[in-house]
């Protein structure tokens, strides 16, 4: 499983998402997965990457929390979990997203 964490400098949610991501990876049996960190430095780089805010997790190159109306740029990102809004997906949301990606990888191609 390929996991990348994209973020901007001084992202206030970086520490939290790294902790939650480690717990979620452990929950799906992938505690040894190397999470690549990618600092997005410029508006041009954000545009090129389609970066919709910090932090953004990509699993096998896919954003498991897509938002069609999200603007590309160097900004903080918010995640919703019911009525709660946070700067990071919850451990449960991350675990569900990782588990779904693992299931998708195991489905036979048609």
Image (cartoon, helix red, strand yellow):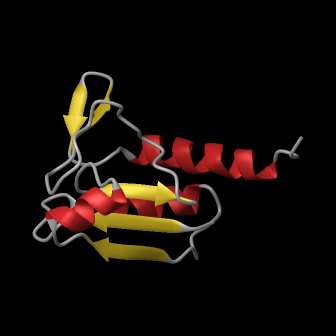
Picture coordinates of residue 76, whole percent (x, y): 15, 51
Quadrant in the picture for residue 2: bottom right
Vertical placement of residue 40 versus 82, above or below: below
**Considering the image in quadrants, where does the N terminus appear?**
bottom right
Residue shown at the point (25%, 60%) measured from the top left: 46
Q: Is residue 21 left or right of residue 62?
A: left
Seen from the viewer's position, the closer of residues 37 and 69 is: 69
Quadrant in the picture for residue 12: bottom left
- Please give the count of numbered marks on the rendered protein: 0
* Residue 15 in sight: no
Residue shown at the point (16%, 69%) measured from the top left: 42
Q: Is residue 44 left or right of residue 107?
A: left
Residue shown at the point (26%, 57%) measured from the top left: 47
Q: Is residue 4 left or right of residue 81?
A: right
Seen from the viewer's position, the closer of residues 77 and 68 is: 68
Picture coordinates of residue 15, whole percent (x, y): 23, 66
Vertical placement of residue 24 versus 65, above or below: below
Q: Is residue 92 left or right of residue 55?
A: right
**Considering the image in quadrants, where does the C terminus appear?**
top right
Vertical placement of residue 77 versus 34, above or below: above
* Residue 41 in sight: yes
Vertical placement of residue 67 versus 50, above or below: above
Residue shown at the point (13%, 71%) measured from the top left: 9
Picture coordinates of residue 51, whole percent (x, y): 29, 55
Picture coordinates of residue 77, whole percent (x, y): 21, 46
């Amino acid at each position: 499983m390929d996991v990348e964490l994209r973020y901007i400098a001084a992202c206030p949610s970086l520490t939290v998402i790294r902790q939650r991501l480690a717990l979620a990876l452990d929950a799906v049996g992938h505690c040894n997965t190397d999470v690549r960190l990618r600092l997005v430095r410029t508006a041009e780089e954000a545009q090129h990457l389609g970066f919709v805010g910090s932090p953004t997790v990509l699993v096998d190159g896919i954003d498991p929390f897509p938002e069609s109306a999200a603007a590309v740029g160097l900004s903080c990102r918010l995640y919703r979990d019911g009525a709660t809004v946070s700067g990071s997906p919850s451990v449960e949301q991350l675990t569900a997203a990782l588990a779904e990606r693992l299931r998708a990888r195991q489905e036979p191609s048609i």
